[in-house]
Image: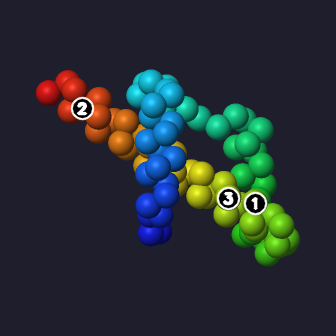
Amino acid sequence: MVTNPGYFEIIDFIFKNKSLDQIIEFHPSQAVQSRVEELIANEQEGTITEQERLELEDYMQFDHIMTLMKARAAQVLASRAS
């Protein structure tokens, strides 16, 4: 997946308002996790609607952003420790 440069603007904004530990420890709620699992199951079964597909894409984009944020937070923490 190609990283959209706009993602880094969002990441930097959130960094200013959360501690690095809070970013690394973030996990979606159980309700969100269950919904994503449901959407993935629908996709695998071939029963996903267009609206559900778009919803799943949104969740996947958010997951990508969070992965980048957590990696950057870990990198900053590691650089501070050395």
Residue 9 percent across, percent down from the top left = 47, 49
Q: Secondary structure at mark 1?
A: helix
Q: Secondary structure at mark 2?
A: helix
The type of residue carrying mark 3 is Asp
Dot 3 surroundings within 10 Å: few (below 14), some, or many (20 or more)? few
Which residue is at a point 47% across and 44% down the rendered structure image? 11
Which residue is at a point 37% across and 43% down the rendered structure image? 71
Dot 2 surroundings within 10 Å: few (below 14), some, or many (20 or more)? few
Mark 2 or mark 1, which has the lower sequence index? 1
Q: Are marks 3 and 1 in contact (CB under 8 Å)?
A: yes
On the image, which quarter does residue 54 sit in? bottom right
Q: Which mark is residue 69?
A: none
What is the image's colouring? rainbow
Mark 2 and mark 1: Cα distance apart in space: 35 Å
Mark 3 or mark 2, which has the lower sequence index? 3
The type of residue carrying mark 1 is Glu
For disc 3, the marked residue is: 58
Mark 3 and mark 2: Cα distance apart in space: 30 Å
The type of residue carrying mark 2 is Ala
Instruction: Relative to 28, say whether 67 is above or below.
Output: below
For disc 1, the marked residue is: 55
Q: Does residue 67 appear in the picture of this structure? A: no
Which residue is at a point 21% across and 32% down the rendered structure image? 79
Q: Which mark is residue 78?
A: 2
Which residue is at a point 33% across and 36% down the rendered structure image? 74
